[in-house]
Image: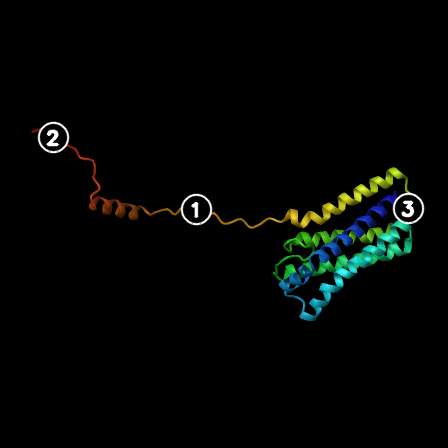
C-alpha cells in the first residue's frame, strides 16, 4: 500500500503542476497582473516571478511525470521535494499578502479567482502531499496490479480536480447590503396629515344632531 499512496501523492502533485503551467500558458498576463495587484514585489522581481514560476511548474511536472512512469525513484523524490518547496513558497507568499490586507486575483489560473485563505490552504495541502510523497515514494505506480493502477489514476484525477477547484468553489461574493425601510417619526407623520388636510383632502363629515 505504500507504493499506492506514494504514487497517489506524486500523481496529484504532478497533475497540479501541469494544471498550473497550462493555466499560465493559456493566460500569460494573469500572473503578472495578480502580482502587481498584490503590491508586494518590486517591478523586476515581479517580472522575474511571472516568467520563472510557470516555467518551474512545467519543468517539474514534465520531469516528475517521466520519473513516475519509468519508476525512477530518486528523480521522483527530487521532483516532489522541489514541488514541496514551491508550494510552500506559494503558501507563505499568499499568507503574507493576506496578512497585509491586500487583495486581488490569486494569479493561479486564467479564471478571475480572488486571493483568499483557501488559496493558502490549497498550497499547504499540496506542500504536505509533496513532502509525504517524497518520503514514501518508491517506484510509483510501476509494478502495481492493473486494478490498483486504474484506481490510483481515477483517485489522482479526482483529488487533483477537487484541490484545484476549492478556492473558486469556496469563494463567497459579498452580497449587497439590504437597507431596512426608513421609519418616519410620528411627529412628521402628523405634520404630513395636517398639510394634506389643508390642501383640500376631505375628512369624514358628520351631520349635526337634530334640534
Q: Position of residue 136 (x, y in %)?
A: 87, 50
For label 1, the crowd category at 10 Å Cα-Cα, with few meaning under 14, some 14 to 19 and many 20 or more, is few
Determine the residue positioned at 77% across, 59% down: 86
Q: Nearer the viewer, mark 1 or mark 3?
A: 3
Cα separation between marks 1 and 2: 48 Å
Q: Earlier in the sequence, mark 1 or mark 3?
A: 3
Give the image quarter of residue 109.
bottom right
Q: Quadrant of the N terminus?
A: top right
Q: Which residue is mark 1?
A: 180
Q: Which residue is mark 3?
A: 142
Q: Position of residue 133 (x, y in %)?
A: 84, 51
Cα separation between marks 3 and 2: 109 Å
Q: Which residue is mark 2?
A: 209
Q: Earlier in the sequence, mark 1 or mark 2?
A: 1
Determine the residue positioned at 22% across, 44% down: 197
Q: Quadrant of the C terminus?
A: top left
Amino acid at each position: 500500500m505504500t507504493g499506492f499512496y506514494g504514487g497517489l501523492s506524486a500523481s496529484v502533485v504532478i497533475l497540479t503542476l501541469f494544471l498550473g503551467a497550462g493555466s499560465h500558458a493559456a493566460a500569460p498576463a494573469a500572473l503578472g497582473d495578480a502580482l502587481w495587484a498584490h503590491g508586494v514585489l518590486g517591478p523586476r522581481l515581479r517580472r522575474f516571478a511571472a516568467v520563472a514560476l510557470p516555467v518551474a511548474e512545467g519543468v517539474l511536472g514534465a520531469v516528475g511525470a517521466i520519473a513516475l512512469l519509468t519508476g525512477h525513484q530518486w528523480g521522483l523524490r527530487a521532483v516532489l521535494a522541489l514541488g514541496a518547496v514551491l508550494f510552500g513558497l506559494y503558501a507563505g507568499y499568499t499568507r503574507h499578502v493576506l496578512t497585509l490586507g491586500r487583495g486581488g486575483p490569486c494569479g493561479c489560473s486564467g479564471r478571475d479567482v480572488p486571493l483568499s485563505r483557501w488559496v493558502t490552504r490549497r498550497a499547504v495541502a499540496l506542500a504536505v502531499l509533496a513532502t509525504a510523497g517524497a518520503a514514501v515514494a518508491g517506484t510509483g505506480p510501476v509494478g502495481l496490479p492493473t486494478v490498483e493502477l486504474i484506481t490510483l489514476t481515477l483517485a489522482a484525477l479526482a483529488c487533483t480536480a477537487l484541490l484545484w477547484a476549492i478556492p473558486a468553489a469556496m469563494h463567497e461574493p459579498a452580497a449587497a447590503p439590504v437597507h431596512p425601510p426608513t421609519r418616519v417619526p410620528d411627529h412628521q407623520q402628523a405634520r404630513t396629515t395636517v398639510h394634506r388636510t389643508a390642501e383640500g383632502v376631505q375628512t369624514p363629515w358628520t351631520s349635526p344632531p337634530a334640534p
